[in-house]
Image (cartoon, helix red, strand yellow):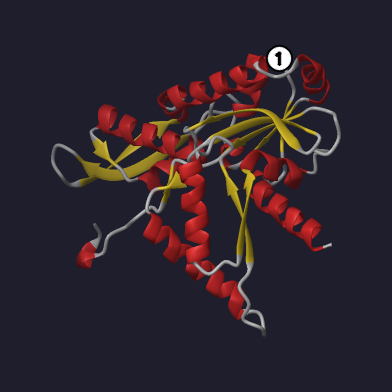
Amino acid sequence: MLSGGVWAVRPLQGGRTAELAVTGKLLRACLALIIAKHVFKVKPRVIVCVPSGITEVEKRAVRDSALGAGAKEVFMVAEPMAAAIGVGLPVETPTGNMVIDIGGGTTEIAVIALSGIVSDTSIRTGGDELDTAIVQFMRKNYNLLIGEPTAEQIKIQIGSAAPVGEEREKEVKGRDLVSGIPKTVRVHSSEIREAIQEPIQQIVDAVRRALEITPPELASDIVDRGIVMTGGGALIRGLDLLLSQETNLPIHVDEDPLTCAVRGTGRIRDAEDK
């Protein structure tokens, strides 16, 4: 709870709707901005990216939230499919294309061909899990209490999945758990790398499982074309190198991995309008 009796709520957690009512309010605010730009106040059609492993109950929650927010129709597309389209992969061809989309709440891994997902793996591990691991590390090793925004900055500035280039250091400010007063400590990038190894290994294991269930006729395509990595998690230093070492496959990171899924949904909408 923040000061003044204000509660901070995260309506979306782990790739699913955690607070249905709050999610509806968030969507209503977003749709109101869109509707305000049009002369005719019509209800828009909405395309929502969802995890490939989403359940029917979770799909219904997403649809209800969007319709309750003022959407005319709601279409759902799997996140790896949207990311693949956003990157520009030839998803409509019979050639196998593999995408790893690492978001805040989930990691989606899919093999795509003929405009469909042939095989997919979805785990509830993403950037948020890395932040939580850093918070716990700082608490355990430095008796320092930090928030998730601070942990995210640590992850972005000095975090890495494997040793790459020059090691870094960062001053971290938080509250001392013993004295209760603010203090500053200096953290090395090698410590953060060790702190996030567990969730990083979960992502690596998921990629290996996805490769194991890939049909053999498409596996050869992936050997030739490699794997495309998208999402905010793709920006973690050394993650592409680590995955390449673990799979013996080339890993390609999109130039703007944060917006791949958004670009993909935009192209899907444009294709429907034609």
Amino acid at dot 1: Asn
Name the spot of residue 265 as percent of width and height, x first: 69, 53
Q: Residue at x 65, y 39 (%)?
A: 80
Task: Specify whether residue 162 is in view.
Answer: no
Q: Residue at x 63, y 15 (%)?
A: 246
Task: Judge left or right: residue 208 versus residue 126.
Answer: right
Which is more toward the observer, 172 or 255? 255
Q: Is residue 222 above or below residue 110?
A: above
Splitting the image into 4 quarters, where does residue 130 fall? top left
Name the spot of residue 35 as percent of width and height, x first: 60, 76
- Label 1 SS: loop
Q: Which residue corresponds to mark 1?
A: 248
Quick one: quadrant of the N terminus?
bottom left
Q: Residue furthest bottom?
A: 39
Q: Is residue 155 above or below residue 41?
A: above
Name the spot of residue 210 as percent of width and height, x first: 63, 21
Task: Judge left or right: residue 224 versus residue 12.
Answer: right
Task: Judge left or right: residue 194 versus residue 38.
Answer: left
Q: Residue at x 46, y 51 (%)?
A: 61
Which is more toward the observer, 255 or 210? 210
Which is more toward the observer, 210 or 193? 210
Name the spot of residue 110 as percent of width and height, x first: 66, 30
Q: Is residue 83 above or below residue 10?
A: above
Task: Specify whether residue 26 is in view.
Answer: yes
